[in-house]
Image (cartoon, rainbow, N blue to C red):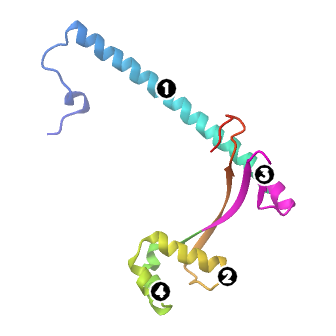
């Protein structure tokens, strides 16, 4: 019969005062750290949401002015990259292997998925045909390099 959670650490003998105080201290530390972690998780979510809003503003401005990169004299730069993320549903894996074979890519069928993804991404970017079961979504990435304005540090 499996033990209940409360029985796993059952102590045969009662804890002495020093050990009990030590366990209590660690328990309080754990609870404090758990609370801090929860607060950090919330802060991370809020920060990501704010960053995403700023990203959209930057992308709108860059698009309106036909920019993909902007550099400043102090070394700070921002670059917009459109990244394709192609994938093949597992239900079509055998069809995809056959497509690789039929199109001279059979050797690629034996290599890591990232290399296959790179092949598909290249074909998408070059507007070459792909099987209808290959799906793709676009990700707009911003890459910031150079001087970190807020912290005063370089990258």
Mark 3 crowdedness (10 Å alpha carbons): few <14, some 14-19, many ≥20: some
Q: CA distance from mark 1 to mark 3?
A: 35 Å
Q: CA distance from mark 3 to mark 2?
A: 27 Å
Badge 3 marks a residue whose secondary structure is helix
Give the label, 1 or 3, closer to the camera. Answer: 3
Q: 6 or 17: nearer the eye?
A: 17
Badge 1 marks a residue whose secondary structure is helix
Looking at the rendering, which quadrant does residue 97 occupy? bottom left
* Magenta residue check for 69: yes
| Residue 113 vertical placement versus 133 (above, below) | above
Per the image, the residue denoted by label 3 is: 58
Q: Residue furthest right?
A: 65
Tags 3 and 2 in contact by the CB under 8 Å rule?
A: no
Give the label, 4 or 1, closer to the camera. Answer: 4
Mark 1 crowdedness (10 Å alpha carbons): few <14, some 14-19, many ≥20: few
Q: Residue furthest top?
A: 17
Mark 4 crowdedness (10 Å alpha carbons): few <14, some 14-19, many ≥20: some
Which quadrant of the figure contains the N terminus? top left
Badge 2 marks a residue whose secondary structure is loop
Q: Position of residue 44 (x, y in %)?
A: 59, 38
Q: Residue furthest bottom?
A: 102
Q: CA distance from mark 4 to mark 2?
A: 18 Å
Q: Which mark is residue 11?
A: none
* Magenta residue check for 14: no
Per the image, the residue denoted by label 1 is: 35
Magenta residues?
Answer: 60-84
Per the image, the residue denoted by label 2 is: 127
Q: Position of residue 153 (x, y in %)?
A: 65, 37
Q: Which mark is residue 105?
A: 4
């Amino acid at each position: 019969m499996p033990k209940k959670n409360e029985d796993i650490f059952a102590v045969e003998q009662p804890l002495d005062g020093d050990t009990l105080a030590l366990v209590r201290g660690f328990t309080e530390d754990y609870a404090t750290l758990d609370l801090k972690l929860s607060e950090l998780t919330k802060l991370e979510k809020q920060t990501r949401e704010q960053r995403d809003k700023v990203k959209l503003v930057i992308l709108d401005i860059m698009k309106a002015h036909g920019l993909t990169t902007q550099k400043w004299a102090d070394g700070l730069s921002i670059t917009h990259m459109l990244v394709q993320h192609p994938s093949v549903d597992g239900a079509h894996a055998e069809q995809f292997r056959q497509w690789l074979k039929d199109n001279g890519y059979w050797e690629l069928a034996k290599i890591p998925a990232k290399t296959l993804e790179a092949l598909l991404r290249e074909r998408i970017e070059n507007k070459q045909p792909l099987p209808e079961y290959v799906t793709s979504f676009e990700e707009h990435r911003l890459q910031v390099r150079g001087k970190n304005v807020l912290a005063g540090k370089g990258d």
